[in-house]
């Protein structure tokens, strides 16, 4: 959620002068022969482009993260876009890599996720709808595996699957709470084996994470084969390979492994690819997009979901390990509204306007939320890179409030810049761009939070204490047993992902600022063997959103000229 | 299912010399500016192309149908493709319009549906997988409406929907029997309202039929608004418009309304678009593809699903009424194997090899199945056009068996030709092409089976008696009441679709040949108010297939070069 100028995002997007995607590719050095066009303004990039570009120098690599966001978000996407445009104003070439928006929330609470104002990704209608169909391919591959699993049960369960152990649900890219819990297989004998199950949103599929983490088609095929869907009654894992589904899944996903090339409102290159959920999954765009993007200019900016404790932690500890790429700096997006929210005096609710008292000039409220910003600066530094605080300015902000954020950041030794990219495009992000250029030249050295050869339990504790600031971890007895079991089964060398709320540094979504004196409860641990991580679940994780009383879909329509209205 | 030469279809498809889709469009007279490219060999055609072409003469319009098929099919698709190639050999320009294959059966029993041998649609991998994502768009639009319906119940059911009356299920393009019957909404209060429901395959969605029958984006939007999903407790229909879902659905389907341009193995144009189910829906490709295709050459060939009692009946009585196009001739595809099957002496099972005794030389068996062919010739003639019998030749056929079919057809006054397009491409279909050219010059005058202003019951009886050869219709009492109710609600002017087995002219799938002395039982009638027809259900209609014990998916994979294997 971001400041909006007078014209709607859709109107601005329509008015923007789009370059042919060939021209955008030229500027990025991507050979036109490596493009698979989807119309004039959108193309898939063949993975072989990475080989073509191998001799070019690597760009500076910058992750764009945020302080603990309000439910409205901090505007990371739009800041990443604005920053790329700002770098272009300085004469540098910058590419952005982003996740693809999920259609579920677009038609639910969000109404779109293409940036805002003069810092958008275009063509925005394609971005907010099917793009090139990658999410649909994930849905199809995921559900084929589910169908083959149930088909195996129906035809006699030769593998001896313990039906109660099945963890592979189905997915759809729609906000549909009624599908969270279902009983399937009802009817006659020919209608399958009845059992309890449910649907998650496609972004929560392990297939989505696999697509995001695969480094090649071969790697994708192998990861799919390793997906564990259940256990046998004897306790052995049952994989997609055992069910002979992984080959067909890879075929369904073949084109989806190629990143999508789009452009910003100022025609700089954007690679949009994959969209793993930010809580139970990695919350980062794809490795292959970054492996291509890193050779396309002077700077590669990549957005990581939610705050630095969430997407950025996984960026550093999971994604960078897979890609081998090493970040040079981090941008930490902050807004006046979120620091005010961290004061604990206001309540922000997704899909509703801000409380009017939050819009008044209250520098003291900003100051009392500053602990959250300071903590995120420490988190970013713990990974060995310099943070730049980007104040994502809104038209109603007061200079006194920006000044508070600036003082807090500078007192913590961080660079800081106010950015007005939403209203002004790249011209509004020049100060931010300058700060990022400097930060990349600071001495830096990537440091993960843990080593992979530590025990799983120790890795979870390291993230909880060193990143979140917890005093320790309380593992439910079954979770402790499962961690030992995963180590026996050969999953001990995986990194960990902790599924917790993004609305607090702690596991309690109501705690603002920098909560201290708490322990992280872990009620359950699971393995994503294809994606290659173990995840620990802390608190209630919703993997299928619901629609609000009045979904954004109600306002989305075609006008009399057949043009789309209501997307933003 | 069709005769196959020594090389696999995939190998032939790979070896074929694909033209740039621009060149294919040029030959069809479609301006390049009206193409939305999806790579070099596939493009969507903007609907405005129909306006560009409006001054060009209309092509002869030929529907390709079949006698009552075995579960393996008669090879209509491949015959339509071969015929187009054969017409090209005669110097005529022919375009084919086809339905898009469904991924469910492709990964289930079929392994692909792109034609066969030297009469294929290319690029076959795109065709058999996502193509340009139209099916995925149907899935997304359909399920958004389902989610908004359940969301309406969850937020208090302001419209007063009678939950037991809800007829709108969900869809997925996968063969998944376990989803036929589900209970949804399980869990806590926030997880929706529990109720019984289920999933159909995407091809069975009313949204798919709407996409196939819409004549413009405006028409699409209006039809979506008219979709009836349930009734109120007071008996009023509840529409997608009432739920404020139709606008968003139209936005999701906007690109999907544009037909997809591909090419045959001999580079002639093919428009592939939509894929409504052949039993409960229309079983024909889209109206917009035909409205464009009719101006692209000398002949437009369109395939209609199953036998002439099924897809062709709906072609004449439903599709032609919507499009306003009038057919000039019909091709009736027949195979030796199906006439043998109609003798009643053999059993053909989908997904299994033919019984070996069917492969022996048995002209007498062919003769005893001839009644079915004669009946289909009558059906085609009842619509006012001349039929041409296309004998789709298989390598193991005997000349004596072809001779029987020829004699039967000629005795009934029909043209007939043996076609070896699968082995020989267009060169093998020249005789068929010549017969079709002649048939189009016969005097002809389109005659529907019934007038729209007849009562619904009378329309159902007209199809049952005049097309199927039944003695009459037995309406279940509730069905009779519902027909009256539909007339009161204003749906009386719709055409009708009868959902019955495609494996017999009768409603009993085990009856071969030309069954007589039977009555059509109708147990239930429903209205597809957006698509614009009333459908009567006779017998068990399966709207969600299941997977066989060993699905085709088990053999589909990537090879060591990353190429797809196992599709056909």
Image (tube, coloured by chain):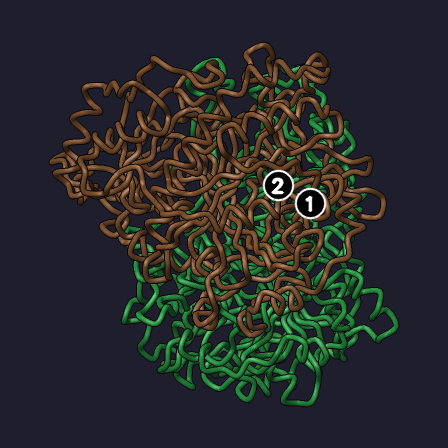
Chain colours: A green, B brown
Is B567 above or below relative to A351? above
| Residues at marks 1 and 2 touching, judged by CB atoms closer than 8 Å | yes
Q: Which residue is drawn at 72% across and 16% down?
A: B361
Q: Mark 2 points at which residue?
A: B79
| Image x and y of residue B43, in percent | 59, 62
User: In the shown orientation, is residue B333 left or right of residue B384?
Assistant: right
Q: Residue at x 43, y 49 (%)?
A: B327
Q: Splitting the image into 4 quarters, where does residue B152 fall? A: top left
Res B240 seen here? yes
| Image x and y of residue B142, in percent | 40, 45
Q: Name the residue under label 1.
A: B119
Q: Which residue is drawn at 34% across and 60% down?
A: A351
Mark 1 vs mark 2, CA separation in Å:
8 Å
Is B58 above or below relative to A468? below
Is B530 above or below relative to A390? above
**Quadrant into which the N terminus of chain B falls:** top right
Q: Which residue is drawn at 53% across and 39% down?
A: B388
Say what secondary structure mark 2 lies in. Answer: helix
- The residue at the far top in this view is B345
Q: How many labels, in total?
A: 2
């Amino acid at each position: 959620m971001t400041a909006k100028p007078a014209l709607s995002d859709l109107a601005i997007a329509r008015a923007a002068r789009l370059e042919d995607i060939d021209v955008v590719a030229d500027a990025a050095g991507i050979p036109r022969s490596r493009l698979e066009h989807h119309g004039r303004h959108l193309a898939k990039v063949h993975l072989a482009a990475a080989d073509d570009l191998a001799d070019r120098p690597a760009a500076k690599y910058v992750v764009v993260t945020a302080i603990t966001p309000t439910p409205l978000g901090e505007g990371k996407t739009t800041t990443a876009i604005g920053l790329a445009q700002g770098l272009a104003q300085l004469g540098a070439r910058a590419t952005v890599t982003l996740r693809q928006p999920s259609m579920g929330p677009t038609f639910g609470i969000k109404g779109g996720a293409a940036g805002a104002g003069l810092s958008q990704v275009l063509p925005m209608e394609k971005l907010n709808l099917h793009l090139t169909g990658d999410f649909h391919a994930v849905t199809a591959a995921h559900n084929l595996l589910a169908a083959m699993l149930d088909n195996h049960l129906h035809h006699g369960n030769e593998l001896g699957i313990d039906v109660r152990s099945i963890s592979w649900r189905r997915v759809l890219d729609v906000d549909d709470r009624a599908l969270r819990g279902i009983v399937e297989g009802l009817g006659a004998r020919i209608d399958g084996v009845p059992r309890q199950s449910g649907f998650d949103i496609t972004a929560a599929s392990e297939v989505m994470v696999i697509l995001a983490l695969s480094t090649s088609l071969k790697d994708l095929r192998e990861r799919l084969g390793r997906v564990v869907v259940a256990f046998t009654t004897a306790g052995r894992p049952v994989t997609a390979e055992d069910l002979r589904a992984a080959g067909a899944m890879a075929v369904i996903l073949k084109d989806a492994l190629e990143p999508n090339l789009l452009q910003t409102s100022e025609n700089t290159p954007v690679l949009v690819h994959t969209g793993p959920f930010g809580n139970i999954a990695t919350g980062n765009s794809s490795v292959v997009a970054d492996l291509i993007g890193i050779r396309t200019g002077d700077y590669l900016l990549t957005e990581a979901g939610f705050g630095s404790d969430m997407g950025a932690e996984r960026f550093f500890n999971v994604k960078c390990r897979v890609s081998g790429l090493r970040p040079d700096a981090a941008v930490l997006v902050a807004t006046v509204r979120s620091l005010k929210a961290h004061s604990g005096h206001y309540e922000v609710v997704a899909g509703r306007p801000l409380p009017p008292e939050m819009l008044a000039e209250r520098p003291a409220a900003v100051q009392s939320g500053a602990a959250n910003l300071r903590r995120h600066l420490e988190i970013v530094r713990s990974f060995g890179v310099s943070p730049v605080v980007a104040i994502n300015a809104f038209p109603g902000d007061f200079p006194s409030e920006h000044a508070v954020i600036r003082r807090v950041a500078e007192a913590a030794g961080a660079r800081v810049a106010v950015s007005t990219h939403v209203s002004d495009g790249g011209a509004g992000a020049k100060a931010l761009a300058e700060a990022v250029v400097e930060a990349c030249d600071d001495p830096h050295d990537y440091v993960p939070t843990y080593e992979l050869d530590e025990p799983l339990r120790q890795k979870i504790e390291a993230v909880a204490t060193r990143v979140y600031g917890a005093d320790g971890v309380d593992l439910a007895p079954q979770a402790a047993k499962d961690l030992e079991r995963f180590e026996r089964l050969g999953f001990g060398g995986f990194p960990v992902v902790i599924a917790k709320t993004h609305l607090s540094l702690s596991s309690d979504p109501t705690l603002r600022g920098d909560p201290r004196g708490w322990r992280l409860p872990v009620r359950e641990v699971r393995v994503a063997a294809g994606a290659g991580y173990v995840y620990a679940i802390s608190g209630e994780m919703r993997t299928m959103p619901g629609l609000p009383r009045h979904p954004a879909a109600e306002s989305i329509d075609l006008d009399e000229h057949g043009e789309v209205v209501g997307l933003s």
